[in-house]
Amino acid sequence: MPKVTMIPATINPLTRLPSVAARKRLVAGYARVSTDSDEQFTSYEAQVDYYTRFIQSKPEWEFVKVYTDEGISATNTKRREGFKEMIADALDGKIDLIVTKSVSRFARNTVDSLVTIRKLKESGVECYFEKEGIYTFDGKGELLITIMSSLAQEESRSISENVTWGQRKRFADGKVSMPYKRFLGYEKGEDGQPAVVEEEAEIVRLIYRLFLEGKTQQGICKYLESLGIPSPGGKTKWTKTTVTSILTNEKYKGDALLQKKFTVDFLEKKMKTNEGEIPQFYVENSHPAIIEPDEWDYVQVEFSRRRALGNTYSGKCCLSAKLVCENCGSFFGSKVWHSTDKYRKTIWRCNSKFSNEKRCSTPSIDTDAIKQLFLTAYNQLMQNRNQVVADCELMRRSLTDTTSLDVDIESKIEETQVVAELVKTLVNENASTAQSQDEYHRKYDSLTQRYETASKELEQLEAKRTLLQQRDKAMALFIRTLKKQPLVLEEWNDTIWMFMVEKAVVHHDGAITFIFYNGTEITV
């Protein structure tokens, strides 16, 4: 009969340490609080002190350190530097056991929690969750961790939903908040509402003025940098995005559009621009304005004009992309004559004058002449201001009415919804009932083609309505501008030029036809 001798195990299969270890287990603590408020900071300090003493009180343990994260939400582990450092040290063999308060302190995301614990387990590193009494090397550990992590994740979802509900309730009540640290021109007032910071407000007004004088966003950036004005983030360099944001943010005219973005994933904290998925709230006169509402509207109209022009707009002057050649339809561009002597002056000439086989007969014209001709045209227009206003209001009512378009759009939306339901029914039937696949594909292709056609038509109708709405706003703005301007203009005014004149056609005899935004044409 064979003799069998048992050789005892000498290594723990999980920790890879000798069963009768001469050395102590290397133990670290992990402490985290979700916010950086004073109350939570006290909790944070208490956690660090507690785990330091707790680990050092165990004779079989050797204290490594307490890893910490302050003021950081734990729905995922991507932004937790202390946590990431601890895991890296553990995988490098510097830690045998991690002690923390609870599963929710470790991670509120089930996937993050389990992936991390399994990675640690493969490297022989154990975790101990004191509140739940769970050791991850215990046979029941993983099941308990899964259950506890799921509960913690649901708690996080509930908190996120409560926060979202609170924010939307504030929006519905018209309560406005701003990221004050990076929002130029405002600070949080004593009553909790936005208050104007006059020194910063002057910079905002300068940006709007520069834009209305014809400068591009990039040109404004360079000008601000030349003055040594820091960006809202405190940097020496300005970006086009920052300037565009300032020029298009309705908060500068004292209004607020709330719920521009929303969270689509409470775990990843991913934000999405609100394109109609959830309600928005527009609050008028919610706080003190830095920019006059009409001036803000002027800027939005000018943005639309420049977008339509594309690369044609140079931004050198408010006359840019407004003077048009009678012969070829090209814009006039500025040229400097006698740039190095006392006769220096800026003239405007057709950009395509020497590009075609036959030269354009339109002459060059200097800036002062253009301005004088405009003053004459403006004063002629204002001689009959009341009639012009009445004509504009009639034109606005007749040309910008979207009633019939609204009916067509609603009908087209219903058609797309019906076709989508037909496609869904067809697919479900094919999945549950045996039928000819050739016939199925024929019906499917026919329905999808119908859907694509209807969607394209809907897109065109909505674009047409948007254009009419933009024209309506522009016409309303023109009427307001007309009503408050002087009857006689003696000096050139950039703003009046920008928002009353759509374009000016230069003729071969040097005359200019000024075409105002209401369609009135005056040749001088």
Image (tube, helix red, strand yellow):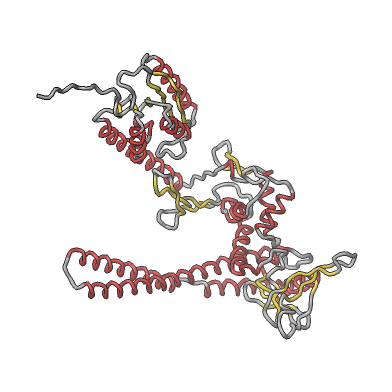
Q: Of residues 199 and 55, which is closer to you in this image?
A: 55
Nearer the observer, 197 or 328: 328
What quarter of the picture does the N terminus occupy? top left
- Residue 258 image point, x, y percent: 48, 50
Q: Is residue 108 visible?
A: no
Left or right position of 31 against 158: right
> Which x, y percent locates residue 511?
76, 80
- Write down the quadrant of residue 4 in the picture: top left
Dividing the picture into quarters, in which one does residue 20 lie? top left
- Name the spot of residue 447 as percent of width and height, x first: 30, 73
Name which residue lies at 45% across and 72% down: 460
In the picture, measured across the screen, residue 481 lies left or right of residue 472, that is right
Q: Nearer the viewer, residue 414 or 262?
A: 262
Q: Residue at x 72, y 75 (%)?
A: 351
Between residue 169 and residue 431, name the one nearer to us: 431
Residue 182, horizontal then vertical, whole percent = 59, 44
Residue 198 in view, yes or no: yes
Residue visible at 34% across and 31% down in the picture: 103
The C terminus lies in which quarter of the figure? bottom right
Question: Residue lying farthest right?
Answer: 342
